[in-house]
Amino acid sequence: MADAKEIRHLLADTYLSFVFWTVLTSLGMCIWYFPLWHMGISGYEVALFADMAPVLLGIRPLRQLLQRYRSIAAAIGLVGIGAYAVAKPEERLLGVAIGAGGVMLSLGAMLYEDKVSTGRLDRDIQTWEAGLVLSVAVRMVFQTNNPVWPTMNETNGGWNKTGILLGVLALADVAIRRSDGTAALQESKKNDLPSGDAKRAAKSAERGSAAWGQAAFGFGGLLFALHSMCSDSAIIGRWSWDGYPSTGPQPVPWGGLAISALAAGFSAGHRIELTTGMLWWGVAAVGAGLITFVSGWTGFGGGIVLAIYLGSVTRSILRAVSRCPPGRTLAAGIMWYNVLVLAHVWVVAYEFVPGGPILRERTWVVMAATMASLYAGVRAARASLASRGSGGRQAAPAKHGARSIVWAAVGLGWAAMLMRLPAASRTPTPFHPEERLMTSAIWTVHFDLDNDMWLAENKIIQTVRDLQVDVMGFLESDTERIIMGGRDWTQRVAEELNYYVDYGPSPRKHTWGCAMISKFRIKRSTHHLLPSPVGELACAIHATLDVFGREVDVIVSHNGQHENLLDRRLQTTELARVMRESPNPFIFTGYVVTKPRKEIYNILYSGGRIHDIEPRDGDRWCQYIGFRGVKRTGYARISRGTITDTEIQAAKFQVPAPGENVTDWTPSYTRVKEDHYPEAYRFPTVFRGKGVRGHYYHVFSEPLYYD
């Protein structure tokens, strides 16, 4: 019966740790919704500091209350996942912020309760670790989404009610559990104070207090590193991705290596002498350098080393924190975590934030600060734990089930990878190969957050499927950052609709992202960081596709803001050069920010030697389509629906046969009726009239066709 009870406790604590990571990873995403729509600081960013709640643990009566009744903080944390039930974004953010304060209070109560009462510090740290690994595994199953995020609901794949039910059951287990049992206290003496020497314990506490600043910085750096690099199995792979052919690992199946590395590090956490050593930190620093500066498998390998290191030092740093004054240590540590999160945003959002140029495109500074923080943390841990004698240099490996849960979660993650592999490795088939037709489109998707702060993959998938597009560019697509949830929504689109996918410039390249899906094999692709001396860094993908046996080049690009004319001029000049120098038929789909027939427009079309999809369309500002060496048969503009603030533009092209001379091809702008072409050449009828899900043909009220 005791074993069954302990298993129940382990499962309950692991699930509440899963809730911790669920709420923490959703907070930034919910905050991001507001500056995204405000195009700058909105004021709602203050919710980030809800995680500072553990500063209250410096108040002794409150700390004692939370130590004795940990279910209080756990219950507050559950508000974060229950917030999904609130439709209004502002109120939902408030619920998530309250939950973030609760889960951080719960973590602090765990550390300091175990210091003075229950004595199961190592066991509770390992269930906290298990919660992270479980969170990653669940996201592997759900294609990088967490099904109980407050941005999920029953319409987009959420399991929110199930998550709340499990949370209530776990909370009930914690509530009825005796936190001050005699057996637990004896376990404390055996595990946390092997010598049983009160004087030695006092010396350890004194040394821990003296090193509280180092421990705090180590804690903040550790939490940030785990969150930014290890909370999703695809993050490390996307950091090292640099285009085709094969310049980095695909998320499926190689994300399994990321979760395995994290679990391996956690399993080695008892080797304190090794994990807190300078040599091991140096190895990790090399890994951090590789993932920050090097693309491909070498950079990915560096990220794997870093993940192992982060797992291995978690136990030591948290133990050191538990021996420091709670209020100031947690306050300083979480504040440092928040500073790193903001710096992590500043490197890409520098145009829209105060002091932005200081960190402009300097991810390496954030990584260096993180590694320096971790060094401070392991030195504090080494000093604190070594003061207890040889027993502190190597703690006993876990003799309970927390490690079993960790590796079971790893197994779940690998099972998800293997189950998803067939879908991820299928060969896509174009929609109309007999007619040699290629449908291209461009869409700015606002980071996969819809207008009401729900994840939008389902809507995007339905729209892309209805449009029957062969090649599509997505702008504002990079979501592998803390503020976007650290997720890769393109995986699900590509797997469910059977496309090749190029994620575009990696998160360490400091852009807002541009991605491309294609039914045609991507022979090679180059990620361009366009000249941006004044404003935000613009990005582009230049891909060469195998289209019915003929090479066709495609550009997907996102230029800078209207306010920065110099940037737009330089960026467009570079795009024009790339197109002009290519010998292949070319299709341009991009975000240009200009009125037709103005300076930037002329640089793009004249300088790039491409033709406008419809020169008479004067109602354009952001998105444009151009082409050369292919026959344009149709053009359509589809309204945005509720997904974003930007429409879809789409065009149909007939691709010449291999060997056919296209040098002198000139487009016809003579419009014809839809029945001029067979069914295969026509745009879908589902978008006619009122359309579907808010998407309908607009501006012209119907597609345009050309002879």
Image: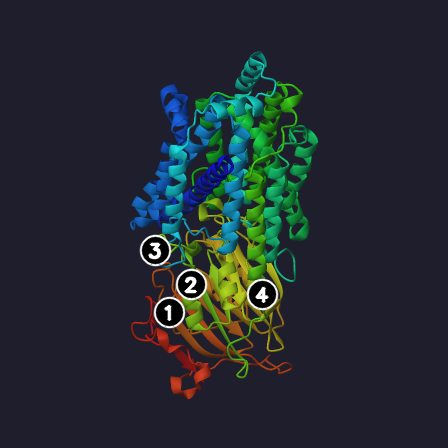
Dividing the picture into quadrants, the one containing residue 449 is bottom left
Identify residue for label 3: 451
Mark 2 or 3, nearer chain start: 3
Q: What amino acid does circle 1 point to?
A: Ile
- Residue 493 x %, y %: 48, 63
Q: Quick check: 265 above or below 61?
A: below
- Residue 291 x %, y %: 63, 45
- Residue 568 x %, y %: 48, 56
Label 3 and label 4: CA atoms lie apart by 33 Å
Mark 4 or 1, nearer chain start: 4
623 displayed left or right of 204: left
Mark 2 or 4, nearer chain start: 4
Dividing the picture into quadrants, the one containing residue 445 is bottom left
Q: Residues within 10 Å of mark 4 (few under 14, many from 20)?
A: few
Quick one: which residue is furthest to the top in this view? 199
Label 2 and label 3: CA atoms lie apart by 13 Å
In front here: 376 or 407? 407
What residue is rendered at 60% in x and 82% in y?
Answer: 657
In front here: 171 or 159? 171
Identify residue for label 4: 422
Q: What amino acid does circle 2 point to?
A: Ile
356 displayed left or right of 299: left
Mark 3 or 1, nearer chain start: 3
Quarter occupied by the C terminus = bottom left
Identify residue for label 1: 638
Mark 2 or 1, nearer chain start: 2
Q: What amino acid does circle 4 point to?
A: Pro
Labels 2 & 1 near each other (Cβ < 8 A): no
Label 2 and label 4: CA atoms lie apart by 22 Å
Identify residue for label 2: 460
Q: What amino acid does circle 3 point to?
A: Asn
Label 2 and label 1: CA atoms lie apart by 13 Å
